[in-house]
Image (tube, grey):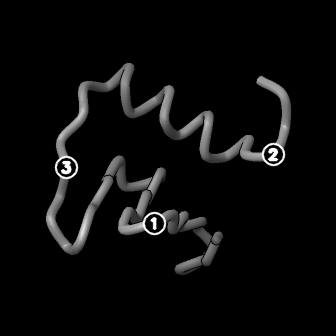
């Protein structure tokens, strides 16, 4: 599910919340730190959900 906060998309999937513009991934309110390339890959996959990648 995609929601927007101040025009910026926030993605919700399962227990996770992904704020791409803030470079933030949370699960159950706890921030999960990812390496930059890992975050970039996750963001790309989430933003292109339902499309072949």
Query: Label 2: how many residues lie within 10 Å, few (<14), some (14-19) or many (20+)?
Result: few
Whether residue 5 is situated above or below residue 41 in the rendered picture? below
Closest to the camera, between mark 2 and mark 3, is 2
In the displayed orientation, state which residue is furthest to the front. 14
Query: Label 3: how many residues lie within 10 Å, few (<14), some (14-19) or many (20+)?
Result: few
C-alpha distance separating marks 1 and 2: 16 Å
Closest to the camera, between mark 1 and mark 3, is 1
- Quarter of the image where one finds residue 39: top left
Residue 4's label in the rendered image is none
Q: Do the CB atoms of the residues marked 1 and 2 lie less than 8 Å apart?
A: no
Q: Residue tagged by mark 2?
A: 50
Quadrant holding the C terminus:
top right
Residue 32's label in the rendered image is 3
Label 1 residue SS: loop
The spot of residue 8 in percent (x, y) is 58, 67
C-alpha distance separating marks 1 and 3: 15 Å
Indicate left or right for 4 with 40 as reference: right
Whether residue 15 is situated above or below residue 48 in the rendered picture? below
In the displayed orientation, state which residue is furthest to the right. 51
The spot of residue 44 in percent (x, y) is 61, 34
User: Which residue sits at x=55%, y=79%?
Assistant: 6
The spot of residue 1 in percent (x, y) is 64, 71
Label 2 residue SS: loop
Q: Residue tagged by mark 1?
A: 14
Q: Nearer the viewer, residue 6 or 15?
A: 15
Sooner in the amino-acid sequence: mark 1 or mark 3:
1
The spot of residue 34 in percent (x, y) is 24, 34
Label 3 residue SS: strand
Indicate left or right for 47 with 30 as reference: right
């Amino acid at each position: 599910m995609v929601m927007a906060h101040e025009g910026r998309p926030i993605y919700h999937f399962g227990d996770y919340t992904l704020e791409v513009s803030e470079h933030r991934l949370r699960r159950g309110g706890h921030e999960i730190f990812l390496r930059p390339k890992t975050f970039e890959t996750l963001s790309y996959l989430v933003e292109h959900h339902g499309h072949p990648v």
